[in-house]
Amino acid sequence: MNDYGMGGDDLEQMYQEVILEAARDPHGRRRFAADLTQESAGGSSAGETTLQLNHAACTPGESHQFNPTCGDEATIHVEVSDAEPHRLTQVIWDGQGCSISQASLSIMVDLTEGRTVDEAMGLAADFHRLMESRGKGLDDEAAEERLGDAIVFQGVSKYPMRIKCALLAWEGLKDSIAKALAAKDGAAVA
């Protein structure tokens, strides 16, 4: 990984600043999921909130992810184009959690929206490998380049309890895409 001529502490500081900035100004965040804190208190019934953001020539998929370790949760909504190659025409999310989970969601949106499903799944695989590196990064400059700003999570990968926070977005993305593609297949059969 390119260290930009910085020492380890300086680089770590820069990474922390990027994560905090992405968490403060999250991209792709929309308020659409049910307020789970209200549901728990008996405020509204589960399942009453339905997202209706579908675009013509797109198939939606949605996944709710929860990290019981620290309470992070997010609902990731994708719209996948019906035309080949399938593209992520919209990636949005709603949720709450620590700055790592919120920043990961924001950066994941920036990296995947507009990409083909195969490209987005490749990015998810690259990010997963980064999280398995335990702070060493990737031995693949092309993968690091593809990850763009997501490479700042290399430092997070040193802390096993924080890895789930960073992966929440990407697991939700993969599940949402799978649901959209399954819905496409179901519609094609019908």
Image (cartoon, grey):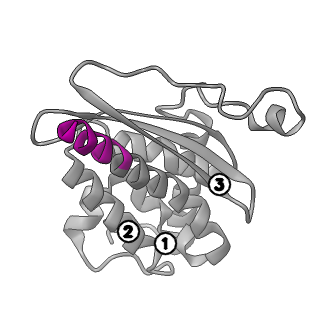
Spot occupied by residue 59 in the image (x, y as percentages of width and height): 30, 32
1 relative position to 150: left or right:
left
Q: Is residue 20 visible?
A: no
Crowding at label 2, few (<14), some or many (≥20) Cα neighbours within 10 Å?
Answer: few
Residue at 62% x, 36% y is: 24
Spot occupied by residue 25 in the image (x, y as percentages of width and height): 56, 33
Could you say which is closer to the camera, residue 189 or residue 11? 189
**Image quarter of residue 31:** top right
Crowding at label 3, few (<14), some or many (≥20) Cα neighbours within 10 Å?
Answer: some
What is the CA distance from the residue labelled 3 to the residue labelled 2? 34 Å
- The residue labelled by disc 3 is 66
Residue at 28% x, 51% y is: 120
Tell me which amino acid carries mark 2.
Asp
Disc with the residue nearer the chain's start (1 vs 3): 1
Tell me which amino acid carries mark 3.
Phe
**Image quarter of residue 188:** top left
In the rendered structure, are the residues bearing label 1 and label 2 in contact, judged by CB atoms less than 8 Å apart?
Answer: yes
Q: Is residue 107 above or below residue 135?
A: above
Chain part drawn in magenta: 179-190
What is the CA distance from the residue labelled 1 to the residue labelled 2? 7 Å
Spot occupied by residue 20 in the image (x, y as percentages of width and height): 61, 46
* Viewer-side label of 1, 3: 3
- The residue labelled by disc 2 is 3
Find numbered disc 1 in the image and state the secondary structure of the residue it sits on: loop
Q: Is residue 184 magenta?
A: yes
Residue at 76% x, 30% y is: 45
Q: Main secondary structure of the magenta part?
A: helix
- The residue labelled by disc 1 is 7
